[in-house]
Amino acid sequence: MTVQPEQEQRIVAAIEAAECVTSGEVRVHLNDRCSGDALRDAQKAFTKLGMHRTAERNGILFYLALESHKFAVLGDAGIHTKVGQAFWDGIRDAMIPELKAGRWVEALEYGVAEAGRALAEHFPHQGARDRDELSNEVSRG
Ligand code: CA
Ligand code: CA
């Protein structure tokens, strides 16, 4: 499935905005099809992208298989301990209607903003010391 540059830019902008207020890292991974188990695919992508290597274990991955209409959101141990499973379920439940309606960019913008808010609460931005530990670019494949 073709992703327009404008759609990708909107997602990157949402990630940049989220990371302005937190040391945490947000990534978005897009796939065409998934194996049937979006969470497992998300875990694989998480590892492949080296997302478990942040200093505070506060990376969050949004995984979306555009043609299979499958979706998962996954947080590393640092943020997961703080927010618990209910937080991920809440984001997912809020995004599903948008995804079903085909508004996947809007769904991701919402989810990334929510993830950023939670990260900011538990992992505030470190000012000049803060590093962009994980690229803000959308990853594919
Ligand atoms: Ca950072
Ligand atoms: Ca980043």
Image (cartoon, rainbow, N blue to C red):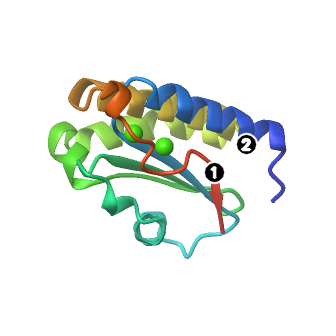
In the picture, the quarter occupied by the C terminus is bottom right
> Which percent across, then down, holds residue 63?
52, 55
User: Where does label 1 land, which residue?
Assistant: 138
Residue drawn at the location 39% of the way across and 23% of the way down? 21
> Which percent across, then down, holds residue 44?
44, 72
Residue occupying the far front of the picture: 128
User: Where does label 2 land, which residue?
Assistant: 8
> Which percent across, then down, holds residue 15?
54, 35
Amino acid beneath label 2: Glu
| Label 2 or label 1, whichever comes before in sequence order | 2
Amino acid beneath label 1: Val
> Which percent across, then down, holds residue 109?
58, 31
- Look at the picture and state if 53 lies above or below 110: below
Q: Which of 95 and 119 is in front in this view?
A: 119
On the rendered structure, is 120 left or right of 14?
left
Residue drawn at the location 36% of the way across and 35% of the way down? 130
